[in-house]
Image (tube, rainbow, N blue to C red):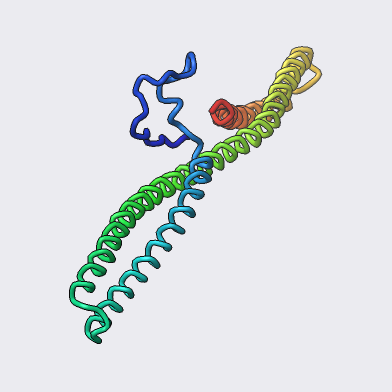
Amino acid sequence: MFLKLQRRNGVSSSMSHREGASPEDSVFMDPREVLSQYSVEWVSLKKSYDELQQQLSDVQRELNELDMKLKAGRITESEHIVQYREKWAMSTQMIQVKREVEARLYEIQKEIRAANNQLKQMEIERQRRERMEEERSHAMIEWMSLKQGFELTEARRNEINAESDRIERERRSGKVSEAEYRKRRIDQIRQLAELRTVESDIKRRLAELLEIIRS
């Protein structure tokens, strides 16, 4: 995820781009880089802002001193007007610069917040990918284990079928009685029914795990 930077005034719209790259690629930056650059600018502008605040306070103090000098008769009315206008013009210019600095600081705040939000989203996405990867890893382990279990049920089914064929031959040859035959066949049918239930559960779980692995 990347943050789109504002184009600076005066940059030609026909600026060339890397071959094969999107025309907007050159105005995208990693939010970490954005934070780094804007943090430097923020510190510098904040220092300038504080200095302007102090200078304005100094000018205000000087204006008050001029009023006190006039009241005390230490300067004439005309001198007061000239000096007051000079200080006032200076403070007006400072206020304009201060407003511009405030506006830029506000823009930087918005960019920093946007970059921080993107970093949070990137972290959420990273954690989501890690969680999914962990789930896939666990699903693969469980899938392999269940696959072996499914193969064991198939082997057991083959054993029961082979046992059924053997009992059938023994019944025909008279080696086992009809009662014993029926008893053992019922037991085999019960075991096969249980195997079908187990196989159905395993197949369902294998399908679920396969979905997780493929996601």
Query: Which residue occupies the foreground of this view, 109 or 124?
Result: 109
Horizontal side of 201 relative to 104 (left or right) equals right
Horizontal side of 103 relative to 172 (left or right) equals left
In the rendered image, the vertical position of residue 121 relative to residue 87, given as above or below: above
Horizontal side of 164 relative to 214 (left or right) equals right
Q: Residue furthest left?
A: 77
Query: Which residue occupies the foreground of this view, 212 or 200?
Result: 212
- Residue at 64 percent across and 26 percent down: it is 192
| Coordinates of residue 90 in the picture (x, y in percent) | 30, 61
Please say whether residue 183 is visible from this viewpoint.
no
| Coordinates of residue 178 in the picture (x, y in percent) | 71, 22
Query: Which residue occupies the foreground of this view, 115 or 130?
Result: 115
- Residue at 27 percent across and 77 percent down: it is 66
| Coordinates of residue 19 in the picture (x, y in percent) | 49, 14
Q: Which residue lies furthest to the bottom in this view?
A: 72
- Residue at 37 percent across and 36 percent down: it is 6
- Number of callouts: 0
Q: Which residue lies furthest to the right in this view?
A: 175
Please say whether residue 108 is visible from this viewpoint.
yes
In the rendered image, the vertical position of residue 135 relative to residue 97, given as above or below: above
- Residue at 33 percent across and 57 percent down: it is 98
In the rendered image, the vertical position of residue 17 relative to residue 4, given as above or below: above
Query: Which residue occupies the foreground of this view, 154 or 209?
Result: 209
In the rendered image, the vertical position of residue 28 relative to residue 114, given as above or below: above
| Coordinates of residue 45 in the picture (x, y in percent) | 43, 53
Among the 4 quarters of the image, the one containing residue 87: bottom left
